[in-house]
Amino acid sequence: MRITVRAGQVGHIRQGLQVYGALEGDRHPERLLPASSARDQQLKQLVTGSGFRGAPNEIVLLPKGTQWVLVVGLGKAKELSIEKIRQCAGTAARTARAQGFTAVTLPVIVERGLGPVEVMAQASAEGALLGLYRYDKLKQLSKHEQSRRIEAITLVVEQSGDLGAAKHGAHKGQVIAEAVSLARDLINGPSNLVTPTVLADEARKIAKQFRLKCTVIPFARLKQLGFGGIVGVAQGASHPAQFIVLEYKPAPRPAGRNRRGGRATKTYALCGKGITFDTGGINIKPSAKMELMKYDMAGAAAVLGTIKAAATLKLPVRIIGIIAATDNMPSGSAQKPGDVLTTLSGKTVEVLNTDAEGRLVLTDCLHYAKRFKPDYTIDLATLTGACVIALGSEAVGLMGNDEKLAERITKAGEQTHERVWRLPMWEEYGGQLIKSDIADLRNVTNTGEAGTITAAKFLEAFVEGMHWAHLDIAGTAWSDKPKPYIPKGAVGIGVRLLIELMEKGK
Ligand code: BES
Ligand code: MN
Ligand code: ZN
């Protein structure tokens, strides 16, 4: 897909569908955006006559001469936000495709109070591309369906002085949207096609493209090396588990600048839960909706997507992606309730529920991260059903041991609308609750209360000394109802959040 950024007026670009934004008024839209459209009396009359008010994502499609025009509502002026702009672009691009257009011209809605133009252009590109995403590679599409494709997106800024910033933002938005789409493809892919080996191959492919270092430790080696957490989960599976380490580091800065820059490059370890299918194991899950457990590798997918985007955008941080990829299966060789594992850290865990497998594989990821002496360690995992109950699909559960990091993640969440909500990590949630009678730890508490937090307290036992944040994405990684730029299915949550967090090099 090619995104072209131009300066001028939407109305002057006669390619495909022309889009305008509209702020909400009581009876008619209060104002058409961009501002230049206000001088178009014919357009104004058409919109006013249509009964359109401008509520968020409300649409009206109108013929204007030989052109088709789409007006998308942005909601009330006071409530305009970067997220509304992102959604508006998603709605516009999807509507254009549904109406059979192959090209669409979108305005970059510029509202100076919301920040630099670059941010608005990025949001527009992200919204449009993510809105157009679909997972159709396993379908035989008819000729007609195949031709239903947007081939060109033109973003238009009114003022030529904004063109440079808009191009910059649009490029960034496109890179990020493509990385999110990679994550979505991996997550939407069924578990017979997206196996641990496929995740490892994807990491190798990224490594090759950007000359990154990639190490993959297969199941047999993991056993020899004492990766007891992932091995315990993987021993029941037929597809061999893979432990994937993908390292990105920025090119050294030119000499001279180096000294003045002062600060050393920060290192982030990103750990991803990569359960390619979670049956629950011997503590098998009920059948209803079990098919969704292909998305139990959404953390791993986010790590891969993030590193790909970071490498493309040349982010000024070092990133170590650490992924534990395996199916969680019941079988004759599967671990059984009551088994005790010795994790890579040396700590032993009594497995009282084989369905609490995410935290088992993550123990090895977190312990392995220590060798890179990261400044920050962040894990992403579809870890607990309790998180779905507590926060639903609007917020990622955030826990950890570092105030500043948590605050920065919260802020990045607001900026990207991948919002996070912090849960407490008081010592009462750990301690006796996660102690075992016969091993160092148990992988489930016996009360089952506060399941999201107690899972995080279990992980905390493996982070020793690291500045750490845990993101429980169980509720946010999959969407049941389509939104303007999030179709049903995989969300690709985490990629946009992490890039926002790391892009300044802090
Ligand atoms: N992958 C699941 C958590 C999950 C549930 C993700 C629903 C997405 C949607 C995880 O491995 C799991 O099974 N957790 C158990 C833990 C319990 C046994 C303590 C759960 O939440 O029920
Ligand atoms: Mn499970
Ligand atoms: Zn799981």
Image (tube, helix red, strand yellow):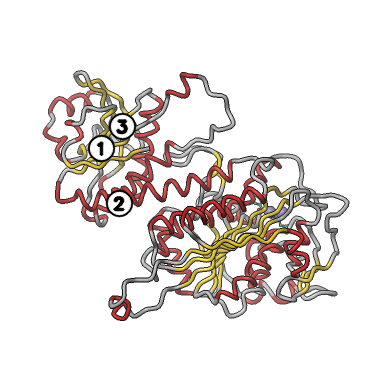
Q: CA distance from mark 3 to mark 2?
A: 18 Å
- In this view, the residue in front, 470 or 104, is 104
- In this view, the residue in front, 47 or 505, is 505
N-term-proximal mark, 3 vs 2 = 3
Secondary structure at badge 1 equals: strand
Q: Position of residue 243 (x, y in %)?
A: 66, 60
Toward which corner of the image does residue 215 lie, by quadrant? Answer: bottom right
Locate the C terminus and report the quarter of the image it occupies: bottom left
Q: Which mark is residue 22?
A: 1
The amino acid pointed to by label 2 is Gly
Secondary structure at badge 3 equals: strand
Q: Residues within 10 Å of mark 2 (few under 14, many from 20)?
A: many
Q: Position of residue 369 (x, y in %)?
A: 59, 71
Q: CA distance from mark 1 to mark 2?
A: 22 Å
Viewed as shown, does residue 181 lie left or right of 82? right
Question: What residue appears at the point 80 percent right and 64 percent down from the top-left corner?
Answer: 351
**Is the residue 482 above or below the residue 441 in the image?**
above
**Is the residue 189 above or below the residue 224 in the image?**
above
N-term-proximal mark, 3 vs 1 = 1
Q: Residues within 10 Å of mark 3 (few under 14, many from 20)?
A: many
Q: Which mark is residue 364?
A: none
How many labels, in total? 3
The amino acid pointed to by label 1 is Ala
Q: Position of residue 459 (x, y in %)?
A: 65, 69
Q: Is mark 2 within 8 Å of ligand 1?
A: no
The amino acid pointed to by label 3 is Val
Q: Position of residue 164 (x, y in %)?
A: 21, 51
Residue underneath mark 3: 104
Question: What residue appears at the point 68 percent right and 61 percent down from the top-left corner?
Answer: 217
Residue underneath mark 2: 169
Question: What residue appears at the point 58 percent right and 55 percent down from the top-left corner?
Answer: 299
